[in-house]
Amino acid sequence: MSYTYADIPEDVHTKPYLPLLHNLWKGFQQFGWEYLQKVFKIFTSDFYTVATNRLNESILTAKQVIEGKIKDPSKVLAYAFFPPVISIREDLQTGTVKLLYGESVDTSFLVVDDDTRTILFILNCHIEDGIPIDWWTCSSEDEVLERRHLKLGYKLKQFPEKIKKFTEVGSRSIDILRDIRNERTPQWNLSNYMTTIVWCSAVINQIEYCSNYGSLGGLWDGIQAQPSFGLPDYLFCYCPWPPMIKTLTLMGRSKFVLRLTGLSTEHQLYTQGENALNLQWLEDKVPELFDLLTRQTWEEIGIPRPTETISETYPYITEKRDIPQKYSITSQEQKRITCEDLGLTWKEAATGVYLDVTHETPENTPIDASNIISVGIGTETEFRKKTTE
């Protein structure tokens, strides 16, 4: 049975946004709204641990690069410090972070519960010259979220419920978070402060993308939910907007993806993965969704090539269609990449595969094990010598 938009209850606050969440939408069509509700509950109760694990792994990887324990960082991918949904090559992380966010900045990632519209957790990182120097996290039970805004009187965790627009939620949050930063680390009281506000559903959707190209396309969709798709607000947004990212967003989806893949992997394809702990969590907690979006993608559907991802189009943008009713993506549907092509099991491939494949790779070029640069993510990366060498 295939479920439709009409099957989602009207009182679901984020209903208008769900068709833009490509991975969750696929799960909804397959399993229905009741199943998706269960997934949301599982993530809202446990995802703080998963997200913290991802951030800790990224910071540990950066530390090992600085200490010289990782000998060839150009073959190692990890998730960005901010936001921790973008994969980036370790030798490019420092320069890209400085370019996008500046030399000295605190960044806070605030995740909002779709149901209660309260803040579930915060991941914070202080970055100096592109390197993470200090970080902290807080869950829904932490006293940080109980702090009240001096002028508004609302608790920090209540902001998304009490304040309409995500951009204002972000700016008002900085009023509190900057004070916390200045209390903890007064030496950085003049540093910039930046937040990202994001629905939990959007985070779940982002971590299920199986390629860096797809993930960045999803990032553009969320940023452009209001201006390009006519939805009530952003799916997620920066506050304040980094000038570089705002400029890239206005260039359109394909150019946005190409510029950021250029900065993060020099346009090479990374089939995004998770470390062992997070993969086990996904398989244990949401096995049906994990099977649909990971195993079936690798074994049956295949990973889209970069040229397919950047050619995806949304007819309703120009034709002014009703997005939920007419949702569709069209692409060239080229030959995709499977785990069999690469000589890997789907579980090996699910840890992430870095390939010497770009948007300039001819569409008819076979992709196989000789294209593998490395397998895995962060400190769990294994280098592969190409068979052609």
Image: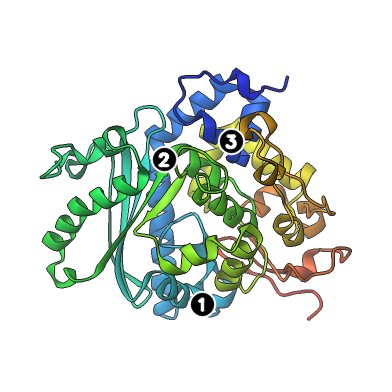
Residue located 56% across and 34% down the image: 18
* Image quarter of the N terminus: top right
Whether residue 373 appears in this view of the structure is yes
- Label 1 element class: helix
Residue type beneath disc 3: Leu
Q: Where does label 1 land, which residue?
A: 91
Which comes before the other along the chain, label 2 or label 1?
Answer: 2
The reply to whether callout 2 and callout 1 are in contact (CB within 8 Å) is no
Q: Is residue 152 left or right of residue 250?
A: left
Front residue of 134 and 163: 163
Marks 3/1 in contact by CB < 8 Å: the verdict is: no
Residue 47's mark? Answer: 2
Q: Quadrant of residue 133?
A: bottom left
Label 3, label 1: how many angstroms apart (C-alpha)?
Answer: 32 Å
Query: In this rendering, does residue 378 appear at all?
Result: no
- Sequence-wise first label, 3 or 1: 3
What element does badge 2 sit on? helix
Residue 167 position, x and y percent, is 35, 49
* Residue positioned 52% across, 54% down in the render: 275
Near mark 3 (Cα within 10 A), the count class, few <14, some 14-19 or many ≥20, is many
Q: Choose mark 2 or mark 3, whichever is in front.
A: 3
Query: Height in image: 225 above or below 240?
Result: above
Determine which of the numbered discs, if any, sits on residue 24 in the image: 3
**As shown in the figure, which amino acid type bears the numbered disc 1?**
Asp
Q: 361 or 8, which lies in front?
A: 8
- The amino acid marked with disc number 2 is Phe
Residue 112, position as x, y percentages in the image: 37, 39
